[in-house]
């Protein structure tokens, strides 16, 4: 007998079910106390290990090519810190009929935080996009967000800003840049092994995202933020965020096409330019909102889960796209090749 399979047109795959199962596990059995510390440490270690593997897999030339791709990085930064905040300001008209003041404040705050790094890279790799550029774009966004997000929040939310510090920069360096550089240095010894075991890297990509989802959702359950919002307001917030995500996914994909980026770069722009980082947003919210931080980050937490699930579907579909000859990219960049188009589908 043939195994029953879902129709190819249905946007559901086993990984989505794993994401939903992870959310359900966190809702029923959230990590608390010492267990939360262990889970958070494991999440940090998984992210560091993921970047180590990326460093070991990518050649130094590919990494430098990704770093030099300034048009892509400017596009991602513009999406993250210009287009997103403008959409957040436009949503002010939904208050107070559709969104309460506190939920709108949280919605506006989520549009100000930097992009994700690990999930953007994982989805870019899954979709066979420009992984080196995604690494650089996500890292630049996180570093810039340390300064830009508090300044934007102070300007648009009216709160005092004192949240960017050397500790935040050091945390990014330790979790992302140091493992990546270590992987680059170790590439001469383990690069061949890593390249031959691409499927294992795909498992690490996906497992790291599941772990981040569990830790983030557990923290929300422990803080009890879900009980502070009525079901009607929560439904309204979900609708607004779904529209916001759909608009950004559409703008980043077709906008990048209008800017004459090739397929691999469009994938990196779409996944890096449409996401918001819960890991960066939570500590910033604790400084900006104090005791109200748990409710203020509710929109960010919901958006974080939504973007992971939706982007997992998109990445899965993109991985089956036929290869394109990135003619416009080669013509615009001259000798620069379309970095990352040869990355493996996971």
Image (tube, grey):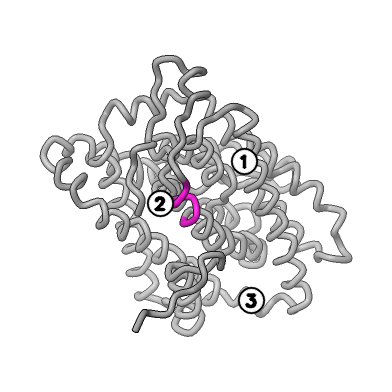
Marks 1/2: CA–CA distance:
18 Å
The residue range painted magenta reads 316-321
Residue 81 locus on image (x, y percent):
64, 38
Residue 54 locus on image (x, y percent):
30, 44
Marks 2/3: CA–CA distance:
32 Å
Residue 317 lies in the magenta stretch: yes
The one of 292 and 259 positioned closer to us in this rendering: 259
In which quadrant of the rendered view does residue 85 lie?
Answer: top right
Of the 4 image quadrants, the one containing the N terminus is bottom left
Give the labeled residue for mark 2: 126
The one of 158 and 62 positioned closer to us in this rendering: 62
In which quadrant of the rendered view does residue 293 lie?
Answer: bottom right
Q: Which mark is residue 252?
A: 1
Q: Secondary structure at mark 1?
A: helix
Does any portion of residue 274 appear in the rendered image? yes
Task: Estimate how packed mark 1 is, as few (under 14), some (14 to 19) or many (20 or more) residues with alpha carbons within 10 Å.
Answer: many
Q: Secondary structure at mark 3?
A: helix
Residue 270 locus on image (x, y percent):
56, 43
Relative placement, left or right, of 216 versus 177 is right
Mark 3 or mark 1, which is nearer the start of the sequence?
Answer: 3
Residue 179 locus on image (x, y percent):
28, 44
In which quadrant of the rendered view does residue 205 lie?
Answer: bottom left
The image shows residue 182, relative to residue 310, as above or below, that is above
Of the 4 image quadrants, the one containing the C terminus is bottom left
Q: Secondary structure at mark 2?
A: helix
Q: Residue at x 26, y 32 (%)?
A: 59
Give the labeled residue for mark 3: 226
The one of 177 and 269 positioned closer to us in this rendering: 269
Relative placement, left or right, of 243 versus 194 is right
Relative placement, left or right, of 28 versus 150 is left
Mark 3 or mark 2, which is nearer the start of the sequence?
Answer: 2
């Amino acid at each position: 007998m043939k195994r029953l399979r879902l129709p190819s047109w249905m946007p559901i795959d086993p990984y989505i079910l794993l994401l939903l199962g992870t959310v359900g596990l966190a809702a029923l059995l959230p990590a608390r106390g010492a267990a939360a510390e262990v889970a958070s440490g494991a999440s940090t270690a998984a992210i560091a290990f993921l970047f180590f593997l990326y460093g070991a897999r990518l050649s130094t030339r590919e990494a430098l090519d990704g770093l030099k791709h300034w048009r892509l990085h400017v596009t991602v930064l513009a999406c993250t810190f210009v287009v997103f905040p403008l959409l957040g300001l436009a949503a002010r008209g939904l208050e107070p009929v559709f969104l309460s003041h506190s939920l709108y404040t949280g919605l506006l705050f989520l549009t100000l935080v930097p992009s994700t790094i690990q999930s953007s890279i994982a989805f870019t790799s899954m979709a066979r996009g420009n992984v080196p550029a995604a690494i650089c774009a996500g890292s630049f966004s996180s570093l810039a967000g340390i300064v830009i997000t508090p300044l934007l929040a102070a300007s648009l939310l009216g709160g005092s800003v004192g949240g960017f510090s050397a500790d935040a920069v050091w945390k990014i360096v330790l979790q992302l840049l140091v493992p990546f550089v270590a992987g680059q240095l170790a590439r001469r010894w383990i690069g061949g092994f890593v390249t031959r075991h691409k499927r294992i890297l795909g498992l690490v990509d996906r497992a790291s995202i599941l772990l981040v989802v569990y830790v983030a959702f557990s923290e929300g359950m422990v803080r009890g933020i879900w009980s502070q919002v009525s079901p009607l307001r929560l439904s309204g917030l979900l609708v607004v965020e779904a529209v916001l995500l759909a608009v950004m996914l559409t703008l980043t994909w077709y906008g990048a096409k209008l800017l004459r980026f090739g397929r691999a770069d469009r994938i990196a722009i779409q996944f890096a330019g449409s996401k918001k980082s819960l890991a960066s947003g939570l500590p910033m919210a604790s400084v900006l909102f104090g005791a109200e931080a748990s409710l203020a980050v509710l929109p960010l937490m919901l958006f974080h889960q939504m973007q992971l699930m939706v982007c997992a579907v998109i990445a899965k579909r993109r991985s089956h796209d036929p290869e394109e000859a990135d003619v416009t990219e080669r013509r615009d960049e001259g000798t620069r090749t379309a970095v990352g188009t040869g990355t493996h589908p996971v």
